[in-house]
Image (spheres, rainbow, N blue to C red):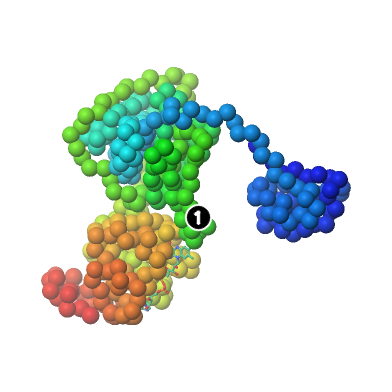
Amino acid sequence: MSQMRVDQSQCILCGQCVEACPFAGVVLGEESIEFTDSCRLCSICVKACPTGAIWLEKTALEPSLDLQEYQGVLVFAEQRQGEIAPVTYELIGKGLEMAKQLGHEVAVCLAGLDVQSLGEKLLTYGVDKVYLYDYPELEYFRIEPYTAIIVDLVSRIKPNIILMGATPLGRSLAPRVAARLRTGLTADCTTLAVKDNGDLVQTRPAFGGDVMAQIVTPRHRPQMATVRYKVMPPAEVTQPHGKIVHCQAEPSQLQSKITIHGFRPHQVASSITDAEIIVAAGRGIGKPEGLELLENFASLIGGVVGTTRPLVEQGWASYNQQIGMSGRTVRPRLFIACGISGAVQLVAGMRGADTIFAINTDPDAPIFDVAHYGIVGDVYEIIPRLIQIIKEGGSLDEISQVG
Ligand SMILES: Cc1cc2nc3c(=O)[nH]c(=O)nc-3n(C[C@H](O)[C@H](O)[C@H](O)COP(=O)(O)OP(=O)(O)OC[C@H]3O[C@@H](n4cnc5c(N)ncnc54)[C@H](O)[C@@H]3O)c2cc1C
């Protein structure tokens, strides 16, 4: 590993490096400066040092891998109680696109109990192989056996790219797999592209969404990414041509210290990520009680309530309701924006909605630039009128007269 070095005979303990370091990575010792665990090897101290006493010693790179040995895309198919997580189809879609560009294959790793039919279903999305691990020990997600079988599979098939959903399960599994494989992992990607040399360009928001970082892992394989749900179109069903490969796991690989005594599915509140209709509240609602009004409206039309970031920051809503660049990405059929200005960070998370309908008092609000339909008006007048019309079984014509 590279490390910072200091020539003690040159160091005059002036402290300029300590002052320049933004990470508290260097401190003044008794006889010389010392580098702490916070040092990021950024070399700002090298430039700050007036005597040239500091330098970054770069160690020779580890013997490089034969990158060409690693080919194809491996998608981890997340399933719970026989249901494939929808992000899996989106990963397959992206995997197929990238594999086609490189002339490689797309494989899926599927683990569980009695999951043969799920494997067959996955083949209908055009993948070349489904590696199937069908064991009682894999019925429920447990981190140790799931990690062990994926690592084992990867060491045998040597994929160039591994994709997992940025779901709670994927976020737990992917870092463990990456650590075992001693490779890089980019979490929470929103865009993926592959270069012709096989390098995966992984884009994700960084610094709270201020910048979109592009990350590559040019010297290691496989390249691993977790991907947000609903940021990529899913693969389409096609005539299957692939095959299922039944994989054997060693008893030692299936061991876990976690014992599951019965299983009760977790009743999650309706998630905005899966919702077909979202009534989204912005700062324009003015008071927390406004959310109750929107919840009544949402339940009447079979939707759920999401919010912009200011409402989460004010403690009116929870983070898992936040839509946008630093929140969730949503793609509902109908998105009703109530008192939302339409900042770019919000729009980044909802522009995929089929139909966007905005209610805002300001006719120049940017939300109207992305909305398909809009009403210039007060949420507290428009929503109660819509509720009334719907309760009275009003027609679309009546609704379109509102505002
Ligand atoms: C790094 C970074 C990341 C961010 N990530 C996110 C994110 O993920 N999600 C997010 O939402 N924001 C995010 N933001 C914040 C974003 O920039 C905006 O500040 C935020 O989206 C504004 O929220 P808003 O539209 O609710 O509020 P405002 O911009 O204050 O808009 C309120 C709107 O309500 C209208 N209004 C007022 N009263 C009424 C009424 N009675 N009826 C109808 N309309 C009314 C006003 O005309 C106005 O247009 C981020 C910002 C940064 C810097």
* Residue 371 versus residue 203 in the image, above or below: below
* Residue 81 versus residue 254 in the image, above or below: below
- Tell me residue 163's x, y (percent): 39, 39
Q: Residue at x 30, y 73 (%)?
A: 368
- Judge by depth and name the residue closer to the eye, 214 or 68: 68
Q: Amino acid at mark 1?
A: Ala
- Tell me residue 142's x, y (percent): 44, 33
* Residue 330 versus residue 258 in the image, above or below: below
Q: Residue at x 46, y 30 (%)?
A: 67
- Judge by depth and name the residue closer to the eye, 244 or 377: 244
- Tell me residue 66's x, y (percent): 48, 27
Secondary element under disc 1, as helix, strand or loop, is strand
Quarter where residue 21 is shown: bottom right
**Camera sees residue 262:** no
- Tell me residue 134's x, y (percent): 34, 25
Q: Residues within 10 Å of mark 1 (few under 14, many from 20)?
A: few
- Judge by depth and name the residue closer to the eye, 333 or 372: 372
Quarter where residue 225 is shown: top left
| The residue at label 1 has a CB less than 8 Å from ligand 1 | no
Quarter where residue 135 is shown: top left
Q: Ligand 1 quadrant?
A: bottom left
Residue that numbered label 1 is attached to = 206
Q: Residue at x 85, y 53 (%)?
A: 12
Q: Residue at x 31, y 29 (%)?
A: 130
